[in-house]
Image: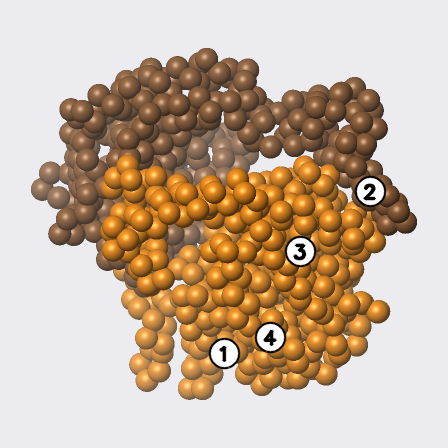
Chain colours: A brown, B orange
Amino acid sequence: MLTVEHLRVREREGQLSLPALQGRTLQRAQQFAEAYLGIARRCTGRSRAELEGEVATVEVGLRERPLAAGLWKLVLDRCRFEEDQGIDYIALRRRVFEEASRRRKECLAGGIFDRLNVLEALAPEFGLDVQGLEEKLFGDLPESQTLLEADLRSPAQLLRDYEIARVQALLLRASALEIEWLPRRSEETRALFRKLKFLQLLYRVDPLPAGYRLTIDGPLSLWGPTQKYGLRLALFFPTLLQCVDWRLRAQIRFRKGKRASTFEIDASSLPRAAQALDEETLRPELTSLLERFGDHPRWRVERAEEIMPLPGLGVCVPDLRFEDRESGALVYAELLGYWSRQGAWQRVEMARRGLPHPMLFLLPKSLRISEENLDEDAAAELYVFRQQANAHRVAERLSRLVEKAKEKPRKIKKLAR
Amino acid sequence: MELEGLSMPEALRWDERSACFRAPASYYPAVLAELHRKQRPYLDEARAYQNLDLAPLRGPQARPYQQEALQAWLEKRGRGVVVLPTGAGKSHLALMAIAAKKRSTLVVAPTLDLVRQWHATLSRAFECEVGIIGGGEYNLQPLCVTTYDSAYLHMERFGARFGMLVFDECHHLPTESYALAASCSIAPFRLGLSATPERADGGEAAFPELIGDIVYRRDIVELSGSYLAEYAVQRIEVELNVDERLAYLRARECYQSFLRREGIRLASPSGWSQFLSHAARSREGREAFLAFREQRRLAFAASAKMDCVEALLAEHAGDRVIVFTEDNATAYAIARRCLAPIITHRSKIRERVELLRDFAEGRYGALITSKVLNEGVDVPSANVAIVVSGSGSVREHVQRLGRILRQAPGKRALLYELVTLATGETFTSERRRDHSAYR
């Protein structure tokens, strides 16, 4: 990832923008990309210091320095370096330094300490000559490491990575994001909300005439803008990039002690990611639940794919889908985050109004919401757990929900409308 | 929560997202105090820290000023900063405070070396398992040590699990990010420790809110000879050789003529940022900036200084010498030339631990470092410091002196400061010596 040191920005009347890569700048960017990728290819098997030496020969103008440094950083991020595994450098240094210290003390009684004598005495122990020993003395420092392999992109791909990476670098200094987004594919919705949940960001969803407005920040934002969530906001950005129709507005304090400026970008500014939408990692509570239900005699469990838009209440994005092996009945489960108390009350309201499928909401005890908040005949259940959801208790509730659905199928369908 | 008739902190606000009133965790004691005062019933689901059943504190008997400092801190309801010189026993004072309050305690230290040192100190003193968070470890225990970085990252999650915080070298705390480590914790008891609490940006003004007021203070000169080792400071002036002098003059003329042309005064408050900004706008500016760095390098790492370090290491071969530099490149150059062990931020944790241990035990007579050993690291046997180069910071210079002041029988500490004559370093040296310890 790039940092703000790799950026050139324009700040005017409270608006922040990144200069477009076009014309002469684009031409120079292509030249840098080709030069740096060429160096990385040529230098496989050589030291990092040699690599950096080659890079220093590429002529870079003053104003081009952030662009060049950013591109080189992205190339370096795809390089794998390693020190010589055959040598225990710490042991080698210990031996040299101990011997030097001993000889220096001996000289207190008379004589002159001579470093060459120390090196000549020790070099044969390591199968080296004096020069070799000197070279290996700090051979594990980064500049001495060898470039093993480089998983390199094409110059065009590198430029595209750079355009995304510099937006992420800017978002590192963001305190909140506001996104207007029109879902075009159900996978988009799942990917966005899963990523938000995984990064433990707080979000509010407000319906717009077309699409939704997502306001994203963190718990500490209540007392003023904080950049504590900048990294998470930056990590969220590539997922947004996989959506078709969006506009992002961020409040960014680019320089310390200065007021925040607004940065805006939309889907037309950057090419959409060609790759499939990410399959995000589940939160650990859900992973362990998935494992414990792995060979359950009654329930087959998998990650939920469905999205449940609820008019006037936003969207419900279940995490897990449980299927009764015998009857084929489905129950969905959603884990609420530590800070999502409002979200939890929203789910209670959803369940009271009706849900398209039976739902089990898993609530951490810290949310301070009682299971009794839902009536016996509601199409959902709340399960409050302390640290980890208990598989046995989850199974009990799933069975209860299926029984309820059998008893009052009409109610669930009616409510679903 | 029923708030009518209660005088709650201004920071308490309604949060739509969580549908409740919220205040920063650090307001927990104030909210509870108000509820008690108004005798309102309440359910406390925030507190997750424990009362500890600690073994009686072992170790040396407390010195009178440590007792006074503890008393002053207790009188301020267990909140406040204690300022004592390095080697005066700040860690022991913290142990006394932890033993007095007996609450789950998190010690926050600036470096991994200090985290290791605190871990050993707490384990030895209280004979219980002590947790570490940071440097790749995550072992949360009621008695725990972490770095400022990890505290900032994780306090949102474990801020309710500690009733007491100890901020070692607490002058690091008042920054925008690290301060969150204090405000995200509910701990009612907070102790800040520092030898040099004042910051160049005036950040110490935030102590009352983050930790508490400065409740006790003693200076190096007050304790020298009685509780700290006696010490002497010797300034050694060296000269650039002919080639270095010519290169120095060329570089100095290059950047100074640029400053004159652009009308920039480096001594003015905005001088440095003006220089950086102007330097980025033209080729001459870039050359001027490189020339500035070159003349600084020549002064900091003059070849006469290298000769001098070699001679001093030979003279003090029977002592325990720490060599400080401003930058890593000079530190590695000395380590290569003198074949002496070195610790920088690049050193692996295993090697750092071994080197510090072996240096303390006398296996090595010298240890080279740039800045990572400036603070806190406790090697009582170290008795000679050589400052090859450094910044103009008084705090840095006092901290470096502090490394050799721990008392030991018959110990007399000696600090050498190497300064290259007729260079900008002479002014840097004057600035950093502006402290009672150097008068």
Q: CA distance from mark 2 to mark 1?
A: 55 Å
Which residue does the numbered mark 3 point to in the structure image? B386
| Residue type, label 4 | Arg
Say whether mark 1 and mark 2 are on the same chain.
no
Which residue does the numbered mark 2 point to in the structure image? A112
* Marks 2 & 1, CB-CB < 8 Å contact: no
**Above-or-below relation of A137 to A359:** above
First in residue order: circle 3 vs circle 4: 3
Q: CA distance from mark 4 to mark 2?
A: 36 Å
User: Neighbour class for label 1 at 10 Å: few (<14), some, many (≥20)?
Assistant: many
Q: Please state the horizontal and vertical placement of residue B81, each as a whole percent of the image.
A: 55, 74
| Residue type, label 3 | Ile
User: Neighbour class for label 3 at 10 Å: few (<14), some, many (≥20)?
Assistant: many
Identify the secondary structure beneath mark 1.
loop
Q: CA distance from mark 1 to mark 4?
A: 28 Å
| Position of the C terminus of chain A by quadrant | top left
